[in-house]
Image (cartoon, rainbow, N blue to C red):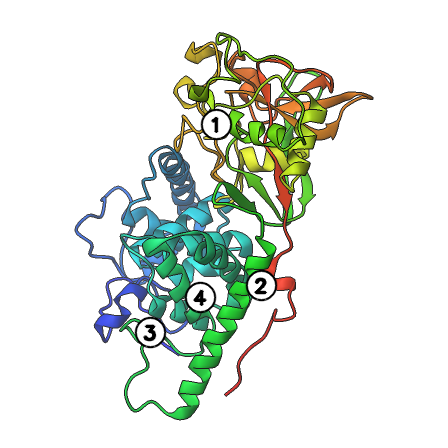
């Protein structure tokens, strides 16, 4: 077990520097930080009074200020990917340690910042309540190509976080997919982290090589661990059969979605339970649909053209554009031919508007503020479809799906009335109201229009349901 260090306290060795800014009974209090970048507006009195500064009437005022700063930091994170500064990270952790509650989105942002700065990581982990979200944030840190969380750091977090048993298998699941689907450095980082998750000791720094003189027992454990990782990867490959890099994994779970009632007023949040699934990252294209037609599984579209192009379905120049003029049944037949199905309204909405890293439900796929530069809608003035993914990555949903607002509206599998189905997402001819994630319209299943397309979804069996789940090597 290692000791956590107070603010400003020098660790005993260079290897422990990333574990500064922790709080536990082993440290009497947080000490005054001495970082040169500290903002005097948010630095509180040092010594024993630093944590006390967040208690009592003055503490309530300070925590309110921290919440406002975290709200602003959260907006900056989603708009520009900018993490909160070190003083705000410290003050947020102090507020939590003093017994104050922060929003789940605030705590998630603090964990992300702690992992990046390598300060307060265990303290931030201790205040997480959703293992799934924790695993996603840890995956981001492990796969950060410029500043990856090392296997040594990952091992220390596994050993010292009392809740690691909840997030380790979920993190392994996330890394399994990357190890299979990614390439280059991301794949290397994912595989190395997976190897670390199977060990009770940290991987050596030299590319995972076994040091000379290692005992045969340790060698046996290492080889068995690598074998187990290989078997898990093989099992994951079976569950991902038929998937491509153009699909996005959405874990099974209970998610909030915004529901717009018939009467005017703000949407209300309801909880929905989803199975694990892999949704198409892009809308189905002309080229993809043509292959289904040529295979004899899909009908010819109701018209050859689009809103402004007469030869849309015939001209190879438009093969990367979304297919249009397809009825609900034609869309269903394509998805079945591809080994998939149409998404339900709830599945589509979670993929479009739920932010897994923070637990927020967005108004638009990219956030709460409308921006005509992030979607092919009426305000953009295109007047017709654009190639799928034209607004990546800024216009993508938090899960990484493109064109969930605008370009073409999309069929879902959810019936509204006999013969009609829910359509989501809005199109190039729609204003901001129809581009909202909660917006919906009911359309006859026979409709085949130049503004209407679709994407598919493939249900997935979670890898941890295999007989290997929970396996652990013994000495």
Q: Check disc 1 and report its element: helix, strand or loop.
A: loop
Q: Residue 138 placed where, x, y %?
A: 43, 56
Which residue lies under the disc numbered 4?
A: 194
- Work out whether 11 lies above or below 386: below
Q: CA distance from mark 4 to mark 1?
A: 36 Å
The reply to whether residue 207 is visible in this rendering is yes
Q: CA distance from mark 2 to mark 3?
A: 23 Å
Foreground: disc 4 or disc 1:
4
Q: Residue 84 placed where, x, y %?
A: 32, 44
Foreground: disc 1 or disc 3:
3
Q: Residues within 10 Å of mark 4 (few under 14, many from 20)?
A: many
Please tell me which of labels 4 and 3 falls first in the chain: 4
Which residue lies under the disc numbered 3?
A: 208
Depth order, front residue of 211/284:
284
For the point 76% across and 23% down, the residue is 416
Which residue lies under the disc numbered 2?
A: 235
Q: Tags 1 and 2 in contact by the CB under 8 Å rule?
A: no
Q: CA distance from mark 2 to mark 4?
A: 14 Å
The answer to whether residue 359 is left or right of residue 262 is: left
Q: Check disc 2 and report its element: helix, strand or loop.
A: helix
Please tell me which of labels 2 and 4 falls first in the chain: 4
The answer to whether residue 99 is left or right of residue 38 is: right
Q: CA distance from mark 4 to mark 3?
A: 12 Å
- Work out whether 345 lies above or below 275: above
């Amino acid at each position: 077990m290692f000791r956590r260090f107070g603010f400003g306290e020098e660790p005993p060795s260079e290897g422990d520097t990333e574990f500064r800014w922790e709080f536990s009974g082993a440290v009497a209090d947080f000490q005054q930080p001495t970082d040169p970048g500290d903002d005097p507006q948010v630095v509180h009195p040092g010594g024993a009074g630093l944590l006390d500064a967040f208690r009592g009437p003055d503490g309530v005022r300070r925590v309110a200020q921290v919440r406002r700063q975290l709200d602003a930091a959260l907006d900056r994170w989603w708009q520009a990917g900018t993490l909160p500064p070190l003083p705000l990270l410290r003050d947020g952790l102090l507020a939590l340690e003093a017994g104050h509650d922060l929003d789940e989105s605030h705590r998630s942002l603090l964990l992300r910042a702690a992992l990046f700065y390598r300060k307060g990581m265990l303290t931030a982990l201790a205040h997480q309540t959703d293992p799934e979200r924790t695993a996603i944030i840890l995956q981001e840190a492990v796969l950060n190509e410029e500043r990856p969380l090392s296997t040594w750091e990952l091992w220390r977090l596994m050993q010292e976080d009392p809740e690691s048993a909840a997030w380790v298998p979920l993190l392994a699941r996330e890394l399994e997919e990357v190890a299979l689907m990614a390439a280059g450095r991301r794949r290397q980082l994912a595989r190395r982290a997976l190897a670390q998750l199977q060990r009770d000791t940290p991987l050596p720094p030299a590319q995972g090589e076994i040091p000379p003189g290692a005992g045969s027992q340790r060698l046996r454990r290492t080889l068995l661990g690598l074998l187990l990782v290989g078997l898990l990867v093989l099992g994951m490959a079976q569950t991902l059969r038929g998937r491509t890099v153009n699909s996005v994994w959405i874990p099974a779970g209970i998610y909030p979605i915004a529901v717009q009632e018939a009467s005017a007023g703000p949407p209300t949040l309801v909880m929905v339970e989803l199975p694990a699934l892999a949704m198409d990252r892009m809308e189905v294209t002309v080229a993809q649909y043509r292959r289904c037609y040529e295979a004899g599984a899909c009908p010819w579209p109701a018209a050859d053209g689009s809103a402004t192009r007469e030869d849309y379905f015939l001209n190879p120049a438009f093969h990367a554009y979304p297919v249009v003029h397809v009825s609900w049944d034609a869309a269903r037949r394509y998805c079945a031919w591809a080994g998939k199905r149409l998404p339900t309204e709830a599945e589509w909405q979670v993929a479009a508007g739920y932010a897994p890293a923070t637990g927020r439900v967005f108004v638009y796929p990219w956030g709460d503020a409308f921006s005509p530069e992030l979607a092919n809608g009426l305000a953009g003035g295109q007047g017709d479809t654009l190639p799928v993914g034209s607004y990546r990555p800024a216009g993508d949903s938090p899960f990484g799906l493109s064109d969930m607002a605008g370009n073409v509206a999309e069929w879902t599998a959810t019936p509204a009335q006999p013969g009609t189905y829910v359509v989501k997402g809005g199109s190039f001819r729609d204003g901001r109201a129809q581009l909202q994630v909660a917006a919906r319209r009911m359309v006859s299943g026979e409709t085949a229009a130049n503004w209407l397309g679709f994407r598919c979804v493939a249900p997935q069996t979670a890898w941890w349901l295999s007989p290997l789940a929970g396996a652990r090597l013994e000495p």
